[in-house]
Image: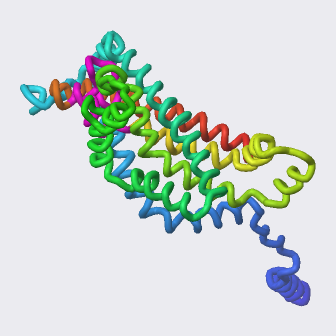
Amino acid sequence: MTSTLGAVSAGAGGRGDTSSRPPRPEPTARSRKTRRAIARSIPLVPAIGLLVVFLVGPILSSFYGSFTNSSLTGAAAASSEWVGFKNYLDLFASPDFPVAVVLTLVFVIGSAVIGQNIVGMILALLMRSGGRVVGAIVSTFVVGAWVLPEIVAAFASYAFFSSKGTLNAILGMFGIAGPAWLFAFPMLAVILANTWRGAAFSMLVYSAALQEVPPEITEAAEVDGANGVKRFFLITLPMIRRSISTNMMLITLQTLSVFTLIYVMTGGGPGNKSMTLPVLAYQEAFKFSELGYGTAIATILLLVGAIFAFVYVRALKSEVD
């Protein structure tokens, strides 16, 4: 009896002794980080849902449509059929497609990478070193063009570059007979017009970046004998390189999708001398009613934009690292 009670007492004592239990494992740093990330992501769920519905959904729908014979007229308008890669094969065999790709790259490099980028930097430096009068003039003519609706800026550019427009009237005051710019130099005209309209964005980005450059560094370089050009290229540009990369990415992607300006000024012509990919996609889809074929062109344009974005993001990441 005594031994039995002792055994029971020992067993009860063993069950009640919590000191012999192994301690609960503490959450690791990785698990805590994961929980915090999930908690921070919960408020983003509605935004992600809207992004899927209004961005990813249309992209997937257009991607699917590029593999069909969808049309605005005829039997294919009521019920389109799957045609596989036929639209893409016809596109790569078309003589207009390589011309449109080259002109799109010329337009992007000329008006965004070179035009808006350089003009925006010059205007930002002018705003920084000039007085209030200079700032007011620059703001009126540059920022005013940026806030204009694109259709209004397109008609203003058409009136400026037309054969009897403002530019030729100014040249005529000096005895110079100007050419029909929109027929003789259509790409130059649309590049200059897009540079005029979009330079304000680059100017604002660079104005903000230049204000972040510590003045004591430039003053020290000036004391060491560096002139303005050397200070700009050796000190200012390296310190705002991230702003330059960000601005280049934004204006490149924006310029890739420019349609209204080119269509109003030249309509892609004369012939196909200013036929960029957005204009070609519009004409094939809505002028010739080949909606599936035009969607294939838009898909190619989307891939080109993705390539530019990937390159710029990699450049920004390397600068951060």
Residue 317, image x, y percentages = 68, 43
Residue 284 belongs to magenta span: yes
Q: Residue at x 62, y 62 (%)?
A: 37
Q: Which residue is drawn at 37% across and 21% down?
A: 100
**Residue numbers of the magenta segment:** 258-285
Residue 194, image x, y percentages = 41, 39
Q: In which quarter of the image is the C terminus?
A: top right
Q: Can residue 4 be seen in this view?
A: no
Against 129, residue 64 (above or below) is: above
Q: Which residue is drawn at 26% across and 20% down?
A: 270
**Relative to 270, 142 lies left or right:** right
**Relative to 244, 97 lies left or right:** left
Residue 124 belongs to magenta span: no
The answer to which image quadrant residue 229 occupies is top right
Q: Residue at x 38, y 26 (%)?
A: 187
Q: Nearer the viewer, residue 60 or 266?
A: 266
Q: Which of 10 and 290 is in front in this view?
A: 290
Q: Is residue 224 visible?
A: yes
